[in-house]
Image (cartoon, rainbow, N blue to C red):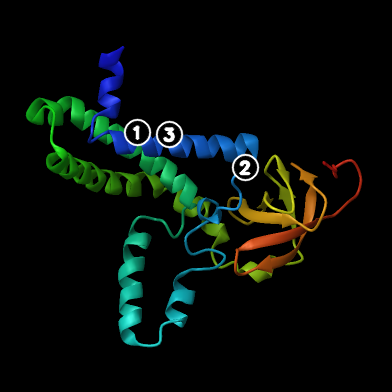
Amino acid sequence: MNEIFSPLVATPVFPASILLVLVSLWSFATVVLGLGHDYHLFSGHVDTLGGGSGSLQESAGHHLTEAVGITVLAPIRWLNLNTVPLFLWTLIFASVWWVVSLTLWLLMDRPLFGDPGWLMATVLFAKNVVISLPITKFLTYPFRNIFSGTEGLAPKSLIGEEAEIWSYDATVSHGQARFKTDGAPLLLNVKTDGPTLVKGTKVWIAHYDETTRVYIVSATTTNNQLLLRE
């Protein structure tokens, strides 16, 4: 049994194993339990519905800041982070990184270096990340067209539109709603204006909080789709 699990906790592999476990737990909590919806980072695109390249360059007061912005955004675009939902990208990267790290450890790193010290383990760790990034770019490329229908949507343009609660429930503190687009549906972080709404409830988007990047929604009906919870 130890021979099976020891490669998973080897120093160059362990960070990838941890990330894969965390992403898997986050996926379970989000999809099954309906938790963690206040963390908008894993719900949409890097530059969709607020916080994209336009807002960065508009805030730049001089050429130096614009140059820094371009430098930062270039790898984001190269990795497809501007067109693929960040959670999906992270899930693919975590899987690729783990497979690459484990494979190289078993076939090359362990036979060559045995039990590496922290310095060599850091080098092996960096090597695995560098190898995993272009593979992740290749694997996420097909998703660019799938999610391209959400590009160009401004947050406030969704106010007054209809969406559907997609998390287990939505409350005054957390929730997610699905908004249909010409491409794949867009997941929005939402809070209700009062009662708790169960998954599947049709809602109106009433307000957008630019600070928290959360939408306030109201149920479109008071029939059996609306469930009050204590």
Category of crowding for the residue at label 1, using alpha-carbon neighbours closer than 10 angstroms: few (below 14), some (14–19), many (at least 20): many
Amino acid found under the numbered disc labelled 2: Leu
Q: Is residue 167 left or right of residue 97?
A: right
Query: Residue, x 25% and y 15% (percent of image)?
Result: 3
Circle 1 sits on which residue? Answer: 17
Query: Residue 14, position in %: x, y?
Result: 29, 34
Sequence-earlier tag: 2 or 1 = 1
Compared with 55, 13 (above or below) is above
Residue 150 placement: quadrant: bottom right
- Could you give the CA–CA distance between mark 2 and mark 1, rounded to whole angstroms? 22 Å
Amino acid found under the numbered disc labelled 1: Ser
| Marks 2,1: beta carbons within 8 A | no
| Marks 1,3: beta carbons within 8 A | yes
Q: Is residue 118 left or right of residue 180?
A: left
Query: Residue, x 19% and y 32% (percent of image)?
Result: 104
Circle 3 sits on which residue? Answer: 21
Query: Residue 88, position in %: x, y?
Result: 47, 45
Query: Residue, x 68% and y 67% (percent of image)?
Result: 208
Along the line of sight, the residue nearer the viewer: 23 or 81: 23
Residue at the far left in the pictured view: 112
Residue 73 placement: quadrant: bottom left
Residue 125 placement: quadrant: top left
Sequence-earlier tag: 3 or 2 = 3
Circle 2 sits on which residue? Answer: 35
Residue at the far right in the pictured view: 223
Quarter of the image that includes the C terminus: top right
Quarter of the image that includes the N terminus: top left
Q: Is residue 212 left or right of residue 165?
A: left
- Could you give the CA–CA distance between mark 3 and mark 2, rounded to whole angstroms? 17 Å
Q: Secondary structure at mark 2?
A: loop
